[in-house]
Structures are given as structure tokens and as C-alpha cells.
Amino acid sequence: MDINAVQESIVEEFSSFEDWMDKYAYLIELGTNLETFPEEYKKEENLIEGCQSKVWFHAYYKDGKIFFMADSDAIITKGIASLLIRVLSGRTPQEIIDADLFFIEKIGLQQHLSPTRANGLLAMIKQLKYYAMAYKSIEK
């Protein structure tokens, strides 16, 4: 499934919820289902700058694709990280760089986050794109 198809799937999932309390509950559920994040990756260099809570992302490159893992000390933030992983993990660096993450606006995520969480979301996206640029530069 390509990036846009995954995003459309997320939009469809979120559209089945009536209000934002249900959507927050779903984000929490997504966060609790996130793959266990190894403790050795909880280091300063994997911490996302600009997030209110602590959020760690680890990226690794295999067979021309980037894979992400994440954790957070805030459960909603962990759910947001799980959505980003679902859309971007297992993609080529160029796919990640070119990705228009339209699902964020379509599900109303950014406008339903506090300003500090919204800034954190942007910081996470920026960091994932930086990883993609770094891996793209070593591909050649």
C-alpha cells in the first residue's frame, strides 16, 4: 500500500468516530499497541526537540528503506507517533521526503491538539524527514 492509501485508510478509521473524545481514545489505543521501544534507544540523540513530552524516535535503514520505532512518556503523543510510523516506516528516503501528510488535516488532528502538542507533531514530522534526507545522502 502506498503512502496515500495508508493515509486514506487512517482518515476512514477516524471518520467512524463521532467526537474527539472517541478519537483521543483511539489514539491512546494505537499508542498502547506500539511496538516495544528498546531502552538502549532512549538516549538524548533520539529525543525529539520541541515536544512538550519526551518522544524518542529511532530510525534504521535496510534494503533501501527506512524503518522507525518510537516511544513517548505521554500516551496521546505515543498514539500520534504510531500514526506517523504507520504512514512513513518501510518507505524509501525519497518517498518520505516527498510525502504530503494530508491525513493530519483530514482527521482534524492538528486543530484538536494543544499548541505545544501541535508544535511537537511538527517537530516529529521534521525529524522523520531529516532522517530521510540523511539516509538519502548516503544511498549514493
Image (tube, grey):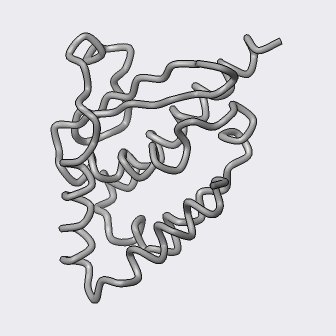
The image shows residue 30 at horizontal and vertical percentages of 27, 55
In the rendered image of this protein, does residue 123 appear above or below residue 68? below
Residue at point 38%, 30% (across, down): 69
Residue at point 35%, 84% (across, down): 16
In which image quadrant can residue 102 be found?
Answer: bottom right
Question: Is residue 98 found left or right of 114 in the rendered image?
Answer: right
Q: Residue furthest bottom?
A: 18
The image shows residue 99 at horizontal and vertical percentages of 68, 50
In the rendered image of this protein, does residue 50 appear above or below residue 23? above
Q: Nearer the viewer, residue 68 or 124?
A: 68
In which image quadrant can residue 110 be found?
Answer: bottom left
Question: Is residue 110 found left or right of 129 in the rendered image?
Answer: left
In the rendered image of this protein, does residue 138 appear above or below residue 81? above
Q: Nearer the viewer, residue 136 or 92?
A: 92
The image shows residue 81 at horizontal and vertical percentages of 36, 45
Q: Nearer the viewer, residue 47 or 35?
A: 35
In which image quadrant can residue 57 be found?
Answer: top left
Question: Is residue 130 found left or right of 78 in the rendered image?
Answer: right
In the rendered image of this protein, does residue 1 appear above or below residue 46? below
State the quadrant of the C terminus.
top right
Residue at point 25%, 42% (across, down): 52
Q: Nearer the viewer, residue 121 or 82?
A: 82
The image shows residue 77 at horizontal and vertical percentages of 27, 48
State the quadrant of the N terminus.
bottom right
Question: Is residue 78 found left or right of 121 in the rendered image?
Answer: left
Q: Residue furthest right?
A: 140
Residue at point 28%, 61% (across, down): 114
Q: How many marks?
A: 0
